[in-house]
Amino acid sequence: MHINVKIDTSQSSYFYYFAQINAFMRGSNTIPTEKIIERLRYENPWWLSKQIPETYHSLSRRLYFDLFFPFVKEKNVRRALVLMGPRRVGKTVMLFHSIHQLMEEEVNPQQIFFVGIDNPIYVHLSLEDILNLCKRSLHLTDLKGCYVFFDEIQYLKDWERHLKVLVDSYPYTKFIVSGSAAAALKWHSTESGAGRFTDFMLPPLTFQEYIHLKNMNHLIHGGTIEYGDKPLEYCLTHDVKALNKEFVHYLNFGGYPEVVLSEKIQSDMGRYVKNDIVDKVLLRDLPSLYGIKDVQELNRFFTYIAYNTGNEFSYEKMSKESGIQKPTLKKYLEYLEAAFLVKVLNKVDVNAKRLKRVTSFKVYLTNPSLRTALFSPISETDTEMGNMVETAVLSQWMHREKLDLTYARWKDGRSEGEVDLVLVDHKRYKPVWGVEIKWSNRYYEKPQELKSLIQFCKANGFDKALVTSIDQLGTKEVENLQFSFLPASVYTYNIGDITLKMKTSS
């Protein structure tokens, strides 16, 4: 008997599709167990071949893999590992690289299970049902010493409750799960999995990882820069022109591993990134999580934000320009930030004091290439370059947790000014440093024109600050202050490099 299941694509919830499949299965007998076992064997070819699929084997590992894999191997603490992150940053690839590494370290391939929860064939099964089928297909009596990978876990309703039960029921089995609906994963894993889950955030590619994936490490060499009265170890380049060319390419295409390595995808960013990443989050993930009814309004709002990444906003201005009510705008911003699409930066005054009432703030895309996907690639002479460079710099800093990053802006009877990026010590609430992000060489020649930065440094007792340029490297002294100038591409690379070293050593 042929039963036609009609899918209403206008529905926002991604659980809707599974509900219809489930209804179909309840009305026409469930899928035969043998077919499900067939699927499991297809997803786990290493059970027989001892090899992961070539598609994944041939892809380069992200630099973050060396941070992630020790958590996979960790068995002394009874915890599931939850790999979170935006869509298409390489979570599934990292799972397969982990499986490959486990086999390289002599783990029995038949003790490694991979299940893509997004496949409708599993929709009527619990995680334990799936585990039992894995055992049955391999004639195992227990799961002691096994590694179980569940991909796209958010497709299982109440996944955190199911996973917590497994962690408690199988103390000698390691569970690793991944998911893209980051807002839901973060909330559920912290609220419901206290003491049972370890979270690992996989962000978009840093510029350092981009250079690594493109095998262009020859552009980078070790060196030192002058910052104040002491030299700092720093990664520099012997060919800033070539590095800048890659930097502009990174701004346009660099956030996603697949895009970096495929000219075909780069030629059609709109279809690949917008349809596969942006639209799925805006039209499916967020509406299903938060019950958003007007998905077109949310889509329009995100497009407005993306075009103006790095600009200062107020709710009044946003509401006027977008036609959306202020309470709704606030919710949309919260949702987009929870989904790792945007980052909101709050404002402080010249002394880095937070203003009592938040009237204005900056909004950045978490990944500059999202803007290219929605509009068009930019070149290094375009007027948008300033904001895109700011967006790229901030996106590197976002890989560090618990940093109180802000920007300074002030206006009083005597003066007004702005400093692009300010780090604040959240305990003492005093500024630690300020950085002026420029895509220009003008201020290297005329540092006295950096009036806002000069005033900010003097107001906070600083004797030094950092300023980015297009390709100028060196120090300039003005009004007893020492400004260190760095090419923006070099600065962006080093934020990622230093962050990775900090994470590795911690």
Image (cartoon, grey):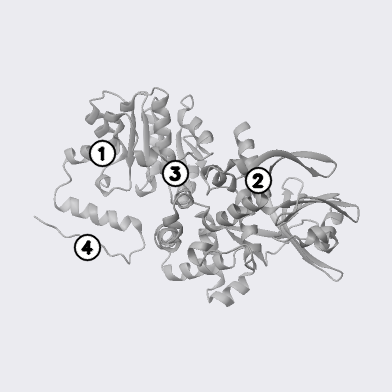
Q: For residue 495, which numbered disc appears in the image?
A: 2
As drawn, which residue projects farthest toward the right? 480
- Residue at horizontal 82%, vertical 39%? 230
Tell me the element at label 3: helix
Kind of residue at badge 4: Lys
- Say which quarter of the image contains residue 344: bottom right
* 2 or 1: tag closer to the N-terminus: 1
Percent x, y for residue 89?
47, 48
What's the distance in space between the residues labelled 3 and 1, CA to CA? 20 Å
Residue nearest the observer in this picture, 420 or 298: 420
Chain-order first, disc 4 or disc 3: 4
The quarter holding residue 467 reads bottom right
Q: Which residue is mark 4?
A: 6
Q: Which residue is mark 3?
A: 91
**Picture quadrant of residue 360:** bottom right
Mark yes or no: residue 506 visible. Answer: no
Residue 264: percent from left, percent from top: 41, 56
Whole-angstrom CA distance, mark 3 to mark 2, is: 22 Å
Tell me the quadrant of the picture where the C terminus can be found: top right
Could you tell me which secondary element the residue under label 1 belongs to?
A: helix
Residue that appears at 64% across and 58% down: 389
- Depth-wise, is mark 4 or mark 2 nearer the camera? 2
- Give residue 42's mark: 1
